[in-house]
Structure formats: C-alpha cells, structure tokens
Image: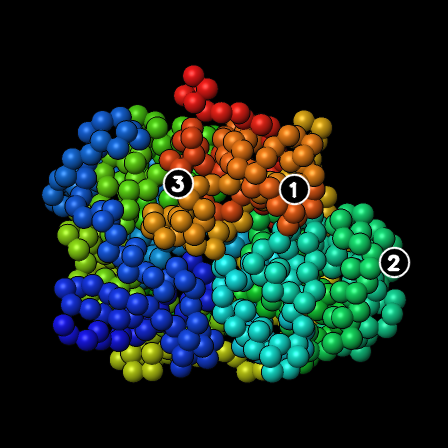
Amino acid sequence: MIAPVIRASACPHDCPSTCALEVEVLENDRIGRVRGAAQNSYTAGVICAKVARYAERNHHPGRLMTPLKRTGPKGSGQFAPIGWDEALETIADAFRKAAAAHGPEAVWPYFYAGTMGLVQRDGLERLRHVMGYSRTFTTICTNTAWTGYIAGTGRLAGPDPREMAEADVIVIWGTNAVATQVNVMTHAIRARKTRGARIVVIDVYRTETVKQADMALVLRPGTDAALACAAMHIAFRDGYADRAYMARYADCPDDLEAHLKTRTPEWAAEITGLSVDEIEAFARLVGTTPRTFFRLGYGFTRGRNGAVGMHAATSLATVLGVWQHRGGGAFHNNGAIFRLDKTMIEGLDAVRPGIRQLDQSRIGAVLEGDSAALFGGPPVTAMFIQNTNPVSVCPEQARVKRGFARDDLFVAVHEQFMTDTALMADIVLPATTFVEHDDIYKAGGQQSILFGPKLIEPPGECRTNHEVVAALAERLGAQHPGFAMSPREHIDWMLRHSGLGTLAGLEEKRWLDCQPPFERAHYLDGFGYADGKFRFRPDWTAVPNSNNGPMGRYAELPALPDYWAVTEAPTGSEPFRLVTPPARSFLNSSFSETPSSAAKEGGRPTLMIHPDDAARLGISDGARVRIGNDRGSLIIHAHVADGMQPGVVVSEGIWPNTAFEEGFGINLLTGADPVAPYGGAAFHDNRVWVRKAGRPAAAAA
C-alpha cells in the first residue's frame, strides 16, 4: 500500500473561516483524513469535525454519478439515466423556448453558497449577463448584518481577527462559534490561556459556545440592540465612554448620549429578559477593558431588526473607543479588503442595464407569479440551479414547493446528491466536489486568499460547474472569452488584474495574507465615510452596501441606536418565538446526507422547548409535537431543555424535508417578507404555536 500524499487545499463551504487544509490523497482517486494547516496563522491547524471526515461525504454511495431525466411526477424521485449531450441540449432547448415565449428574463439561473469558490460558484453569472437572463439579488444570509455593520463603519472590514488572541475580553455575539466557525474559539481560548482573557457569549439559547463562556447572556431573540443601548447608557453614566475618541471619530456623540438617557438597564431588562445585574456586569466588564474584541456573527442577519442590532453593537464599541487598541474593536467580515477583479469570471463587462434582480429569498413568491416579486415582468419558466437547495433552505417552503411543482416550469439542477430540490427537477446533473476541481477562495472571517487545486479525478460522469456553464454557453450561442478559459486561467487572470501576482505565485505561497495595516483595520485613519466619522446616525437608505432599493419598513428605522420592535411578537394564539440556528454537524443542508453527521445530531429533527413550557403543555422529552403558524404546520419531536428563556423554541439545522413525517421541513414556518432596509430573510424571527401531537396515525390504528 502506498503511503498517502499530503496536498494543500482550502475549505469550500459557506463558513467565515475558509480554513487552509491539508488533505491525504490516497490511491484510486480517494482522499483520507483532512486536517487544518498549522502554518496558516488563522486556521492554526484546527478545523471542524465535519470537514475533517470529508472523505465520508466525498466517497458517499449516494453521490450522483450520471445525468438523469425525470420520468415520473415532480418530486416522485423517478428518473432515468441519460447522456450528457442529451441533458445539455434539453436544458438549452428549454431556455430557448422560455426566452422565445416571454423574453430572456423568463430564465432564472439560481445559485448560492454550496461552494464558496469564485470560479465554480460565480461563473454562472457570466452566462446570465451575456444572455440577459434574470439576475439574482442575494438575501438569504448576509445582507442584513452587513448593512448594519457598514451603517456605522462605512466599510465591511475590521480589526485583524487574529487579534482576538491579544484581547483581554472577547465578546462573541450572535454566533455559535463552536459549531459554525471553530477558529474563533481557537484564538479566544488562546487569549484566555495566555492573557487570562474573559470570554463573553451573547446568544438566544445555551449553545456549545455559551457553555464555554466566562459570562453568558442568554436573551430573548431580537433584543440585542436593547442590551447594547443599555450598555452605552451605563458607559456614559459611569465614565466608561471615551469622549475624546468620539469627538474625533464619531458623528453625533452628544445626540446619542441624550437619546440614551432613558435606555436604562431596567428598560433593557424588561425587553431582553436579562437581569439588571447581568446588564450592569456586562457593561462594567467591557467598559473597563480597553482590549475588548467584539466578534459579531450572522445571528444579527436573521431578525427583522437585525441591521439595527448590528449597528447598535458596533456603536457600543465606538462609545467605548476600543477600536484604538490592539486586541480591540468590532469585527464581522473582511469582505472589503480583497478588491478582486471578477470581470472575467462573472462577465461583468456583459451586464445589460435594466435587467430585473429577483429576490433569492422570495423564490416562492416569484415562482407563484407574484407581480411585485416579478417586478411586473414575465413569469419564470426555466431555471438552472447550482450550489444551493432552495426547496429545503428557503423561507415560506409551502410556496416554494408549490412553485417548483408547476407543470410549466422547467428546472435543471447540478448537484452532488439527490437533494429536495433535485427531486423536483426535470434534469439532474452530477457535480464535482472541491477536491475534484480547481478553484480560488477568499475568506470572510479572516484575511486570506487561498487556492484549492484539483486533487483527484471525479467519480462517474461528474462535471465541474465551470464545464457545464461553458457547455451550455456553447449550445446557446453565448459569446464571451471567459467561456473558453480553464479555471486555472480564470484564477491567474483575476490575480494579475487585481494586482495580486499570479496563480503560480499563489500555489507557491499557498495563501495570500491580505490583512490591511493596523491603522486602517482599526479605522485610525478614519472610518469609511468621506468625513472619516463613524455614523451613530446613519442614512439607512444610503448605506454603501449592495442593494436592490429600500425594502421592508425602512421608513421606520430608528435614527439613532435603539431597540426596534418590528419582530414577529408572540400573540395569544402564537405564543412562542421560533429560532432556526445551524447544527454543529451540518452546514446549511450539506452534510445531512452523511450518516455520522446525522447521528451526531440525534438522527432526527428536534424542537428544544423550555421545561416550564413543556410542563404547561403536557409535553415530555421525545414526544411528537405539532408546531405551526399561519404559514403551515409540521410534526417534530420535542427535546425538553432549559437553555433558553421560556417562550422560545429552537430547532437546530436544516434537515432534509424527507426527515419530517409530512415532507415539510422547518422552513415551512419561516417568513420571506423583506427585512429593512435592503432585504433579507428573518429565519430566527417567527412566532408559532406548539401542541401535543400524540402517536402517529399508523401506531394509533
């Protein structure tokens, strides 16, 4: 037996860490163990368990191996193998017919973050732009949090995240880092061990990260801004506020101080469910510790007031002046530091003006023909889907499933597994994994650009996203030089045109460290607005973040940091707040197909419910319950746990719809109404009722 060869790579998954990897390459185009690269100063040799056992997923017997054509009703799972030429020509013919009947905007290429590789993920944009197909406004994950962060700072970038190891307090707010970005914990725990740093975790239930905290604040969903405002009130009251810093770097500190006079700890306690003592202790800790590092997560993006909550948290960092110090500041994402020229990958030189941008989160409304969601344009009658599983992950699942069931809608899905979305397709194409193609990755939660080379040959007839897009372009007559380039040529072109060297240079270095100098990263040369001032009073409809125009209740956004009561508040008939956070062993809907990940998550979907609520409803641990709201209802098993406040229920992970008794997953209950100011889906912001369900019908009989 030949010893494994260790090859460098990068994690492709939708996680801010974007870990540098070392992959065992075995005989017969197989991989073995995957490890974190110790030489990368952010990854630091640590990766999550699910990626460490990636071989289980890569060599899973359920991998799609050949193109398939639907032979039975949509969703029946009845398919027959076909050749690649027939599959591609069927897709191209459907696109031609859709465009002929309704115009090119009737075709909607749809993708998201199943891979974060820039070539394999974003190359579909090139086909879209050249052909004039409907564009996609991406709102599923980042939009609300990014807008809230940029509202204050003017730029999506912050302190070097490795500085967590140099902090004296690390506030992990709105992210379950143990489950979703383990490297945050690597650096936070290093600070605890080497500096005696304290770790504060703020979340809505007792996550694995909360269990690691020196100070844990478990508040009601959507009340983060109230906590931040009370902490700022205390900072002004007790002399923790850095007035000299604000005079130089903030727009209206006097207005903010006057506004916060009534935002007392008692006021915040009523809203958050925290005690006054907890709020005072938190404010005192961060107020007396200059090296406080606020690590702000994507929990903020999943509430109707999430942008306001994120802005309030960054405002707290500004009131305290912690940006000035190494190991201090507020970090969310480093997206603005890279400045990559993606013209060739995305075909940005072929963008046609006036093409509508359909809201990714509102796919249910789009496919059901909602005129507003369609911007008054033609219906969508043909789709090509890569890197995402909308029938499972999108909100308002009942509408999504009805839309995909339309007889007049043609759908082609390019996937690694037979997902809920692939089951609804007319054509299914087998896709490669990250070890089976070349790609380049930029980190969000750190500062690296990394190359992930092809390490093994793909199984069966699997083809890369890039190959399939280029093949469709040829059949559709789409002309652009990017279609004729290889992934490696694309990467080299982008690096050269971005002033970042060559692919050969990147391969030699393994990654590029793009972290800006301390003064720029900490905004000591001024924040991202023209006057260099942090905005306590942002112009919410002019925040410099990607947008498709103002959305939601944007006209009611508070002028200064405040608690904004626009969440789905409990009612007498729907008295619970449902939160749907990530599971540790899944990544969105990925990894749910691997036996070890499913087993680690308990083998079935569950609903965490507080013991007081369970006792009142007569619900025992493991019991079947029905949970619902005006969007629908589903059966799930109860897990009685006291890790959240009464009135809050939690369902972790996006299990396949088929894991639920009635074929509807948890996103049946989530809403798709656009979140202010620029859209987004409020996955953690749903009021529901919960009832005992009794035994299944078959068992009862």
- Mark closer to the chain start, 1 or 3: 1
Q: 63 or 676: nearer the eye?
A: 63
Residue designated by label 3: 656
- Mark closer to the chain start, 2 or 1: 2
Secondary structure of the residue carrying numbered label 1 = loop
Residue designated by label 1: 610
Given the image, on which type of amino acid does mark 1 rest?
Answer: His
Whether 414 is drawn above or below 45: the answer is: above
Q: Looking at the rendered structure, which numbered label has been put on residue 261?
A: 2
Whether 269 is drawn above or below 7: the answer is: above
| Residue 110 image point, x, y percent | 36, 45
| Residues at marks 2 and 1, CA–CA distance in whole angstroms | 35 Å
Residue ID at (87%, 70%): 238
Residue ID at (33%, 78%): 510
Q: Is residue 457 left or right of residue 198?
A: left
Visible residue check, residue 506? yes
Q: 220 or 523: nearer the eye?
A: 220
Given the image, on which type of amino acid does mark 3 rest?
Answer: Pro
| Residues at marks 2 and 3, CA–CA distance in whole angstroms | 48 Å
Residue at the far top: name it. Answer: 701
| Circle 1 residues within 10 Å: few <14, some 14–19, many ≥20 | many
| Residues at marks 1 and 3, CA–CA distance in whole angstroms | 25 Å
Secondary structure of the residue carrying numbered label 2 = helix
Given the image, on which type of amino acid does mark 2 rest?
Answer: Lys
